[in-house]
């Protein structure tokens, strides 16, 4: 998503009008399906995907009309019967797609640049697009809302409507369609991405960091060896720390419920040191690599040091989903799969 928004801003900056197709809602699948986006340029080229198949083809066929009338347009694609056989997104139900014309004018450039910056900064901001009942939304009505206040946009929404939108979107990390007496509003939240702390920059860490970045985690890599923890080995990492020692290395890290700690260092002693620290944080997830025998030995040592059994019961160890993984890349897939599941469960619990 971040790459698509970056591309969107670049096209607007170059003076090119665009049409954006967005899945507004879908029955038969999770809420996070909503918000999937695709840019359709006037020459027919696309960036991103809304799932392929007939839904995507319909969006491309409809885009010229949206360029011509400069209005937003929605359509509902029936996923039952013969149509369902050709789709790879969901089986049964309906998919509602919004197509918006976005002109390359100063106000839109400023608005989407501000939204992109909020995404990069991890600030909680809502991009709000009002939709009229006939879907013929005029240009220039989008706005950004932060802390129940319009911070950018035409400001045509009254304070009560803004407050209702902010309240209904609270805690949501996926786009949603909010229906109010004043009209329908498509709301896209920015949110603070979960931060993944990887302790140990060895052979498993490399593919784990790359995959975690691809699925939306901010990745922080830590190791006590500079030849392992460096930008060449981890080009997509948000931050790389070379620590003098693993002892006390979490003391100055910003770890909270949206933090995920993965312990994959090079030895039992380091893993035990890291796990002992991790159990005193408020992390939303703690996982440790290794066999059950290694885990049990470390657990016994920590119990002897006074760590309660209840704290250890919350640790994911051995780390990763049970997919018979053997290679570093396969182990990375099992770890990141578990992280995705833990993140989804935490979002439901905290939402």
Image (cartoon, rainbow, N blue to C red):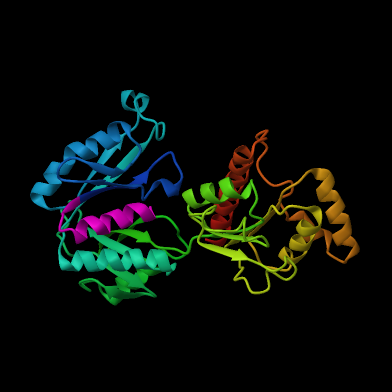
Residue under the point 32% across and 57% down: 6
Residue under the point 65% across and 34% down: 323
Residue under the point 24% across and 34% down: 57
Residue 145 shown left or right of residue 337 in the figure: left
Q: Is residue 85 visible?
A: yes
Q: Is residue 151 above or below residue 20?
A: below
Residue 177 pos. (x, y %): 34, 55
Q: Is residue 257 visible?
A: no
Q: Is residue 262 above or below residue 84?
A: below
Q: Nearer the viewer, residue 195 or 187?
A: 195
Q: Is residue 179 above or below residue 26?
A: below
Q: Tell me how many marks there are.
A: 0
Residue 51 pos. (x, y %): 35, 38
Q: Residue furthest right?
A: 304
Q: Is residue 260 above or below residue 51?
A: below
Residue 112 shown left or right of residue 242 in the figure: left
Q: Residue furthest left?
A: 68
Residue 2 drawn in magenta: yes
Q: Nearer the viewer, residue 140 or 246?
A: 246
Residue 145 pos. (x, y %): 33, 71
Residue 22 shown left or right of residue 233 in the figure: left
Residue 201 pos. (x, y %): 63, 54
Q: Quadrant of residue 75?
A: top left
Residue 138 drawn in magenta: no
Residue 76 shown left or right of residue 250 in the figure: left
State which region is magenta. 1-18
Chief SS of the magenta region: helix
Q: Nearer the viewer, residue 337 or 239?
A: 239
Residue under the point 15% across and 64% down: 105
């Amino acid at each position: 998503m971040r790459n698509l928004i970056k591309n969107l801003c670049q096209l607007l900056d170059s003076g090119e009008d665009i049409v954006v197709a967005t899945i507004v809602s879908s029955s038969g699948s999770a809420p996070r399906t909503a918000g999937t986006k695709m840019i359709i340029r006037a020459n027919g080229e696309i960036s991103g995907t809304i799932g392929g198949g007939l839904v995507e083809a319909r969006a491309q066929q409809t885009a010229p009309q949206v360029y011509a009338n400069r209005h937003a347009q929605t359509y509902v694609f029936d996923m039952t019967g013969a149509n369902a056989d050709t789709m790879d997104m969901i089986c049964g139900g309906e998919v509602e797609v919004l197509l918006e014309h976005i002109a390359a004018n100063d106000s839109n450039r400023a608005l989407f640049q501000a939204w992109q910056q909020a995404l990069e900064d991890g600030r909680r901001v809502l991009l709000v697009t009002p939709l009229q009942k006939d879907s013929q939304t005029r240009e220039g009505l989008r706005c950004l809302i932060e802390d129940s206040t319009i911070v950018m946009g035409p400001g045509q929404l009254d304070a009560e409507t803004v407050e209702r939108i902010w309240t209904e979107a609270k805690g949501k990390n996926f786009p949603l369609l909010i229906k109010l007496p004043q009209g329908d509003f498509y709301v896209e939240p920015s949110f603070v991405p979960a931060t993944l702390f990887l302790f140990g920059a060895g052979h498993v860490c490399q593919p784990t960091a790359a995959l975690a970045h691809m699925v939306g985690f901010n990745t922080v890599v830590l190791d006590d060896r500079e030849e392992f923890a460096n930008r060449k080995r981890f080009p997509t990492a948000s931050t790389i720390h070379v620590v003098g020692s693993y002892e006390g290395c979490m003391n100055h890290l910003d770890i909270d419920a949206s933090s995920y700690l993965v312990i994959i260092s090079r030895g039992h002693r380091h893993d035990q040191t890291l796990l002992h620290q991790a159990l005193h944080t408020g992390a939303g997830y703690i996982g440790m690599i290794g066999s059950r025998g290694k885990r049990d030995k470390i657990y016994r040592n920590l119990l002897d040091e006074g760590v309660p059994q209840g704290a250890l019961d919350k640790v994911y160890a051995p780390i990763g989903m049970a997919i018979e993984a053997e290679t570093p890349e396969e182990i990375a897939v099992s770890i990141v799969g578990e992280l995705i599941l833990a993140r989804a469960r935490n979002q439901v619990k905290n939402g």
